[in-house]
Image (tube, helix red, strand yellow):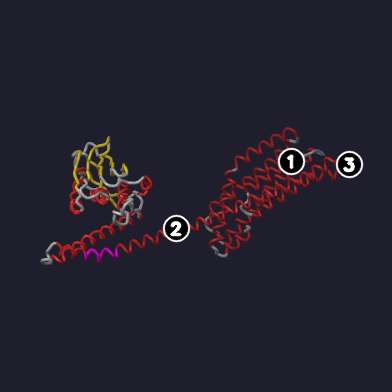
Amino acid sequence: MHAERIAKDASGHDPAAHDDFKRRLNDYACIGRKLFWQRFTSYSAIALLASIFYDWKITMLCYLLIWLSEFYDQRVFTIALKTETFDRRALSSVRRNLFLSTIISACVISFFCITIAVLQGPTSHFMPIFVLIAAAIFACMNNYQFVPILFLRLAIYLVSIIVIAARDIVLADQVSSEMWIQLFTTIFVLSFIIECARHFLSFYNEKINQLKVLEREHEKAKSAARAKSEFLSIVSHELRTPLTSIKGSLDLIVGGIAGPVPESFRKILEVAHRNSARLTLLIQDLLDLQKMGDGKMSFAFADLRLDQVVSEAVDEMQAVAERRSIGIRFADVDEDVIISADKNRLKQVVTNILSNAVKFSDPNQTVTVSVHRNGSRGCFSIRDEGIGIPDEEKDKVFSAFQQLDSSDHRKAEGLGLGMHIAARIVEAHGGRIGFDSKLGKGTTFFVELDEVTGRHSAPAGNAMRPAA
């Protein structure tokens, strides 16, 4: 689409045409500015040669005209880059400036080359023709954003080349074969330049189309992400309220507060109670994932004893482990490791890892917990004696909605969010989470957090900062 068509569409408030025009204009101006020193070097070298071997006064005059046109080009580039929106008047002004700067710069370079050819007299005119051909190829490589502007510049250069080649034939008393060879060679080169222009223009249009496709896909991806985020948020909040009531009622019934429970009902109620608790945790995981994705999760940091946080999480998991006939024991506990963390979120990390270890352990196996210092960092590790993690599954451990299966049967429940959320929380604390695993021999997860040195008590206030 050429410049006038784009300008007309943009002035008619077509957003797609307006964006396309802005992109092309920005590319045109940025490339023009970027190649300033390259043009400066070329112009100066040509002017130096012409002033030495021909007339220096005429050369300096042409050199001055070239730089006046160059300064005007830079002004047009600046205006183009500063313009954010294009109404009818702005479009007309930009289009006029683009064509005017093209005509001025191309005509000045052509005038310089034709002048040199005149000073040379009847000869091969290698220098002026070479300069014009180089300028034409340079335009094909860098001024392909607007087809009319490219064709206008090429037309001026090509006419100048033909004028130089044909002038000797017209004015010569006796036309030599060399003059004809120069003319036909020039025409052949012109066809090559036109082919270059077509190639670069095709390549640029293809790039523009690919960018448009990528932008459309990016917008679709963002819309899908927003829809998913809103869906998770709405569903999670709508489910949490009634589920909290159900779980609370089941807590009262199972606890005997509402009265004795017949033994024939107890087993059914306990299953419902456990499942309601599991659903509550799943919904909380979804809400946490939503907050992390939106960057809305905050942390209340305080100086904490790492062993105490881990111990509280272990106490809360004991009942779950006992139901599965799995033991949890401590080993190598350092009691003076102080870290700065959000207590509830850090307990969530420990609980998620412990839950994962219990899920993948067989009855009568033991999960071992340790708290120790690793250099300048506080570290806790949780080791199970379960099935281990296959090598091909290790890259999925911290991914969202990924649940690992054993080769025998699926042991894990849930949505596969626990380890992902744990990793995000540790990341927000500036720590590191990882694991070592051997298939059939168990897995050890570890978390490292920066230790607070020189302080052994919690600060007066809690520092708040958003999730990373």
x and y percent of residue 390 in the render? 35, 46
Give the quarter of the image for residue 34: top right
Numbered circle sitting on residue 144: none
- Mark 3 residue element: loop
Gap between marks 1 and 2, in whole Å?
A: 54 Å
Check the picture and name the quadrant holding the N terminus. Answer: bottom right
- Mark 2 residue element: helix
Residue 303 located within the stretch drawn in magenta = no
Front of the two marks 3 and 2: 2
Question: Magenta stretch?
Answer: 237-246
Mark 1–mark 2 CB contact (< 8 Å): no
Query: Relative to residue 55, is residue 344 drawn left or right?
Result: left
x and y percent of residue 13 in the render? 55, 64
Q: Residues within 10 Å of mark 1 (few under 14, many from 20)?
A: many
Q: Which residue is mark 3?
A: 174
Numbered circle sitting on residue 221: 2
Q: Residue at x 60, y 52 (%)?
A: 204
Gap between marks 3 and 1, in whole Å?
A: 23 Å
Type of amino acid at the residue the image marks with label 1: Pro
Q: Determine if residue 207 is in view.
A: yes
Residue 243 located within the stretch drawn in magenta = yes
Q: Nearer the viewer, residue 147 or 58?
A: 147
Query: Relative to residue 355, is residue 181 drawn left or right?
Result: right
Mark 3–mark 1 CB contact (< 8 Å): no
Type of amino acid at the residue the image marks with label 3: Gln
Front of the two marks 1 and 2: 2
Q: Nearer the viewer, residue 285 or 148?
A: 285
Q: Residue at x 40, y 60 (%)?
A: 226
Q: Which residue is mark 1?
A: 128
Give the quarter of the image for residue 49: top right
Image: 339 above or below 271: above
Q: Earlier in the sequence, mark 3 or mark 2?
A: 3
